Amino acid sequence: MWHAGARNLITDVVGLRVGHAADARLLSGTTAILFDAPASAAVEILGGAPGTRDTELLHPQNLVQGIDALVLSGGSAFGLDAASGVQSHLRSVGRGFEVAGQRVPIVPGAILFDLANGGDKDWALHSPYRELGLAAAQSAGADFALGSAGAGMGATTAVCRGGLGSASAVLSNGATLGALVAVNAVGSPLVGGTRHFWAAPFEMDGEFGDLGLPVPLPADCARPRSKMDPRPGTNTTIAVIATDLRLGKAELKRLAVAAHDGFARALYPAHTDFDGDLVFAAATGARDEVLSAVDRLEFSAAAAAVMARAIARGVFHAASAPAFAALAAWRDLV
């Protein structure tokens, strides 16, 4: 069996750093994942309303084999500007895909809709997300905040505030998996009307309250709880699953598919028409071993479990809501 890494964060995977930038008045923000060297990456999108940048180049048949960073951001389509800020930082330090004597940093990104969460979105001509992306990249390190931070600053779920979550696992063969997720789901992370997390069976060391599942299960726990008046593009859970193994795009595509099972384990409902649910998968290549068939089964199961834990941790750590926010934080639920 596996255990959590030293930090229980995605940065337990050797070769990457994470930075946040957010504006409490805007009630939105950005999270950047920077790789120390170009990383292999893939993507799987199962939500019906995604918002993305440069995801086409992640398909196995396309030219670019390594990315320099990933970006998760609030701001709906405006938040796609955050990747430009991360790109500016990377260019300033000489990173990027070399072509015709120039370097172009490769920075795929995904966004969530938090425009209607009560924050002040009355910016001037240009949105603030490019500058938030730059600040997030400049602050990247091994340790970072969970909950109401970065891309999770203004996130919500059906029943409480969402947030930015992360978790890790070290597998029996020594490989490490880490997940990072911004939880802004149309569905609920909680069982029925309780404070218990759907992800409870996967919890490690009381990392999100140690409540377990409710006994008995509520009679109405199968009734979907969702945001009122869902509209296309207004809800999304966006995530990264990363490993220190050396994997190609096709293998990472399978890892992203497995990690989506963590969405279904931690959120109900998930992958709806109104979500933009997306998982980036990335490999830093710090470890060279080849996975056996048994290892692959453990790897896929661990990916789902780590993602489910990260989702619950994002909600668990969300701060008490500001006066103009519509939903209470999990910590304030009775």
Image: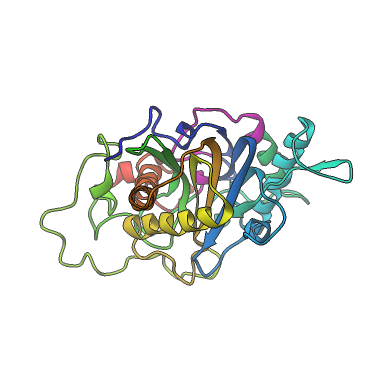
Residue 138: say if magenta. Answer: yes
- Which residue is found at the position 78% from the left and 32% from the top? 94
Magenta stretch holds residue 65: no
Q: Considering the image in quadrants, where does the N terminus appear?
A: top left
Residue 324 or residue 41, whichever sits in front? 41
Query: How many dots with numbers?
Result: 0
In the rendered structure, the answer to whether residue 11 lies left or right of residue 89 reads: left
Q: What is the span of residues highlighted in magenta in the rendered image? A: 136-154
Q: Nearer the viewer, residue 267 or 218?
A: 267
Q: Residue at the right extreme?
A: 100
Q: Is residue 207 above or below residue 154?
A: above
Q: Position of residue 141 (x, y in %)?
A: 56, 28
Q: Quadrant of residue 267?
A: bottom left
From where the camera sits, is residue 63 visible?
yes
Predominant secondary structure, magenta span: loop
Query: How far across and how far down the image is residue 228, in percent?
Result: 42, 67
- Report x, y in % for residue 159: 35, 56
Please determine whether, in this image, residue 92 is positioned above or below residue 99.
above
Relative depth, front residue between 79 and 311: 311
Q: Which color scheme does this rendered protein use? A: rainbow
Seen in the image, is 150 located left or right of residue 68?
Answer: left
Residue 298 image position (x, y, % from top left) = 33, 49
Q: Is residue 112 visible?
A: no
Image point (73%, 46%), residue name = 84
The residue depicted at 73 percent of the width and 41 percent of the height is 87
Q: Residue at x 33, y 50 (%)?
A: 294
